[in-house]
Amino acid sequence: MAAVDVIVDQLVSLWRIPGVRHFFPWTFLIISVVGSALKELQFVPQTYFSSSRNALNVYFVKLSWGWTLLLLTPFLLLSNSCFSRTFLCRRLLSLVVATAIWYVFTETFFYIEDISGVCFEPSSADITKTEFTSKVTCRRAGFHWDGYDISGHSFILCYSALFIMEETAPMASMKTTSLSALPRMVLNLLYVALNLIIIMWVWMFTCTSVYFHDQTQKWLGTMCGLLPWYLTYRVWYLNPLSPGLPPQRHLKEEKQHA
């Protein structure tokens, strides 16, 4: 597993570069704006990823929150095992908060698309089906639904990547040598997998920006991903009555307030 240790060291070194962690959230805004412009100008040719049926979209993006929880939950359990049970529970509570954010925003997007849409026949947008008042019932009947579809992909890929970035940050200051061989190996593998997920989310976010949705739908989706990340990790989690920050930032804040 020496190769995995080397990869982990390289990833940790990358995240330690001044400005990388600070600039990362802005990456999504830049990609969304530039990608939307390229889509409008039709500068990007059609590729395998311009189809929503590509493997990454079907097996990863559509299950993105499940993949995030599947990998991040054991990572948090291992990386915070040396802290008190109370602190560990607070870190796990951050998963509950993030899942609630994912659920509320996703359901809100569905609701907006339902109340703003209309059902029509595939052959003609002029022939509406007023008896169908939701996207689900309309599509089940074999028709098309046209509503304001805020980009759920832009939201979840942005939010999930930032969430993983924050919760894996302790690896930059963690002494994994204090762990026994098996937990250390599992932790390193999880860390590598989570970084690969971040790379995948950024790539698929880029594909969404250049191939799908209207400009405002993508920009709104991106802002909806950035806003809860900022309000939690930059505002609420600095307060005592919250799940709190990951270990190294938690200790840094304690020193600043000492």
Image (cartoon, helix red, strand yellow):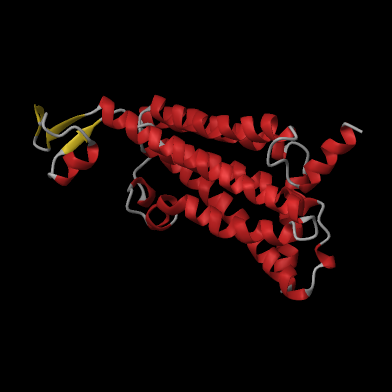
Q: How many marks?
A: 0
x%, y% of residue 216? 40, 24
Q: Relative to 18, is 67 above or below?
A: below
- Name the residue nearer the viewer: 143 or 85: 85
Report which quarter residue 106 is drawn in. top left
- Name the residue nearer the viewer: 208 or 37: 208
x%, y% of residue 138? 17, 39
Report which quarter residue 161 is drawn in. top right
x%, y% of residue 239? 74, 32
Q: Is residue 121 left or right of residue 106?
A: left
Quadrant (top left/top right/bottom left/bottom right) for the C terminus: top right
The residue at 71%/62% (across/down) is: 78
Q: Work out whether residue 71 can be spotted.
A: yes
Q: Residue furthest right?
A: 258
Q: Relative to 170, is 23 above or below?
A: above
Q: Is residue 78 left or right of residue 112?
A: right
Q: Relative to 167, is 138 above or below?
A: above
Q: Work out whether residue 43 can be spotted.
A: no
The residue at 61%/57% (across/down) is: 73
The residue at 60%/60% (across/down) is: 193
x%, y% of residue 116? 27, 25
Quadrant (top left/top right/bottom left/bottom right) for the N terminus: bottom right
The residue at 51%/38% (across/down) is: 101
Q: Is residue 156 left or right of residue 161?
A: left
